[in-house]
Each structure stands twice: as structure tokens, then as C-alpha cells.
Amino acid sequence: MTKELCVEYGYTSLNHVGEELCGDNVELVVADGYTTLVLADGLGSGVKANILSTLTSKILCTMVAGGAAMEDCVGTIIETLPVCKERQLAYSTFSVIHIDNAGRGHMFEFDNPEAIWFHDGHTNDFPNREVLDICGKRVYHTELALEAGDLVFVMSDGCIHAGIGQILNFGWQRKEIMEHLDRNVNPHMSARAAACLLASACNDLYLDRPGDDTTVAAIRVRPKLEVHIMVGPPVDKEKDAYYVQRFMQGADKLIVCGGTSSQIVARCIGKPLKTSFDFPDREVPPIGFIEGIDLTTEGVITLRRLLSLSEKYVSDKDLTPKTYTKTDGGSLLANLVFEEATHIVFFVGQNVNAAHQGLDIDITMKLKLVEHIADNLRHMGKTVTVNYD
């Protein structure tokens, strides 16, 4: 049975050294089964560049997502934005991707570095890239037909300028960027992790002092993967079996957070609950094991760690790796919901947990934790549903 496909995205920006605002901007709209991503690069840096790139990306994204013809959208931007009199350069360049969940769509590029296509385990040029003349400007158009595991990288020119006058004489050439991606990207890596990987390499070439605003955005087509997370026991104890049945139905992966929740699931499915005595991280309680459940963790403390990791993950300025190699419950949980999941359903029990009596833990705290985590997951582009029982 062929799994349903969906589109995920991610991006990371580096500000020009000494600037509070980035001169690049990424705008995203997901609506009616289509994902529209625009990366715009304003001329120069600082406030002026930020305003120009923001204006460009918002106008383009709104028009494209609203169904306007791409040629009309590009023409509107080119005619609207002025040209620098001194350098005869457009005040803003851009890359636009507009695709459906099956990976079919279009890409338009105007004066940004050429997009890179990661397909079948290695990088490629798009073979069907064609030149269009729109309002006297050279715009490149590519018809997209992406497959599961494919990634498309678009970037501002800060990427190809990385290292100029420092480590490299002429910046980071396109061929070298592609070789770096070939060595480090795999088809299972999320779009956010892949974009961060490339931006981090640029930052290294800039010696942590970027001489140009640098932004990398990635779009990835991947199979849908739905994860169900059970947090806490339901109010009505008589409905434990029904609650667990709902939790287990239709999921690709199952996660149980909390000791009481784990006991309920183990009892209802007739499997023993075993607890690990390993402490990979002394601040996170050990995980448990239930046959048929992909991950069993402690509750509130592990969720707090997950929230902390999610705050870093959603920051488009954070360059730390987005995959987690540690084996504590928080890291394992983060890998499942940040990197693997596309759709996440929480089953939150609102019963007062007797095990929490006398501790600085209450039902309100647990609900707020789940709400904050759900908000961050939505910011990552995940489809999130929260059920309360």
C-alpha cells in the first residue's frame, strides 16, 4: 500500500555581522493542498534590505497562494520594485516554490543562486530549467515533479559568498556546495535539519562573522507519518480501555508519556511494563518498554525537556544539529516528533494523578506544557491535533 505523501519545509538565516535584522526573508503559506515558499534577498543589509525582502516575499506568497498566475506574480514584483541606479541591480531577488502534496508544481528564480535538487541520494541540477523573459528580466522556471525523499534547496547569495577573503578566495562555489550536501545529507533527513546543515557550514566559512545575510530554505517531499502521544490518565477510569483503543487506532508510531499512562496502556493491551535502569541523562528519568509501543517515557519532566528542545528547534537562528544522538527519553521523543512525524495527535488525560500529590505538578501545568509543545510543532510545519479526555 502506497503511503500518502506530504511536503515539509525548513529554513535558517544568518544575519550580516553587526546587524540586528536579516536582509533576507522567507514567507510560507500552506493552503488547499499546496505549499508556497518564497525566499527573498533584499539588496545590501540591515533595515532597508529587511523591508525590501519582507515586502517582496509577502506580496509574492500572497499572490501565488491565492491562485494568481506565476508570470503575473513575478511581473508585478519586477515592475513594482525599483532598480538600484548605481549598480543597476534589482532591489530584491527571489526564489518561489509552489507545489502540491504529491510534489507537483513550479519553481521560479530571479537572480538568486540556482536551486539544488537532492534526488536519489545525491545532488543534481534541474534538467528542465528554462529561461523566461518577464518584463524584460531573465527569470528561470522549473516544472517540479518531486519524489518521496527529494529535497530542493534554495538560498540567498550569502551562501556562495561564504569565506570570501577569509578561508576562500572566491567564495563557496556551487560545485563545492553540492559536494558538501552529497557527503552529509541523507533522504531521511528533515527539511529543517538539511537547511540548518548547509547554513551551519556557511557560518563556519564566515568564521562565525557572516559578511553577508545568508539564508537556506529547503522543501522535502516525504511519506506521511502519524504519531500518537498519550499523556496522562482520562477523567473517567471506566473508559480506560476505550481511551487506549482510540490512542492506538490509525497511528504509524505510538508514544506513551507518564508512569500512570504506561500502566493503563500495559494493562489494557495485556503486555508487561518494563523499566530501564539506564540514565543517559541524569536530569531526565529513564524510559520504559511496552511491547507494541514505540516509546514509553516519564511524564512532566520529560515533556519539559521536549519543550526546551522544541524552542531551540524552531529558532531559525539556531545552528545546532537537528538530530539527536542521545538515548534519554527527551532526545528519543524529540527525534520522533521533530524529525520523523508529519502528523501528531495528542491524547491528553485530565484526571488528577495521585502520584503527583505533594509535588509541584498539577493538571494545569501539564496542559500548558502540551499546548506550548503543540504550538512549536505547528511552527515546524507539523499537523497537530490535541484531544482532551
Image: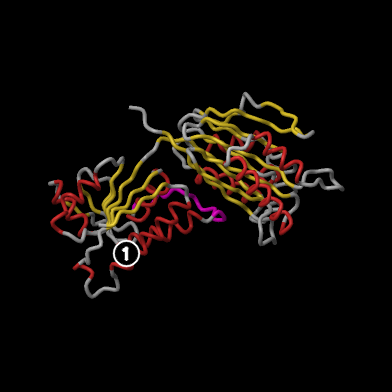
Residue occupying the point 35% across, 42% down: 226
Which image quadrant: the N terminus? top left
Magenta-drawn segment: 316-327
Colouring style:
secondary structure
- How far across and down, in percent of the image, does residue 135 sit? 77, 35
Q: Nearer the viewer, residue 133 or 215?
A: 133
Counting the numbered discs, the total is: 1
36 above or below 232? Answer: above
User: Is residue 122 left or right of 2 when viewed as pictured?
Assistant: right
In the picture as drawn, the residue positioned furthest to the bottom comes out as 358
Q: Nearer the viewer, residue 153 or 8?
A: 8
- How far across and down, in percent of the image, does residue 181 sit? 56, 37
Residue occupying the point 66% across, 46% down: 40
Name the residue tied to disc 1: 366
- How far across and down, in percent of the image, does residue 93 sit? 71, 43
> Within the magenta stretch, is there residue 154?
no
In the picture as drawn, the residue positioned furthest to the right comes out as 86
User: Is residue 262 left or right of 308 when viewed as pictured?
Assistant: left
Neighbourhood count class around disc 1 (C-alpha, 10 Å): few under 14, some 14–19, many 20 upward: many
Secondary structure mostly taken by the magenta-highlighted segment of the chain: loop
User: Is residue 69 left or right of 389 when viewed as pictured?
Assistant: right
In the picture as drawn, the residue positioned furthest to the top comes out as 127
User: Is residue 147 left or right of 215 when viewed as pictured?
Assistant: left
Question: Is residue 384 among what the camera can see?
Answer: yes
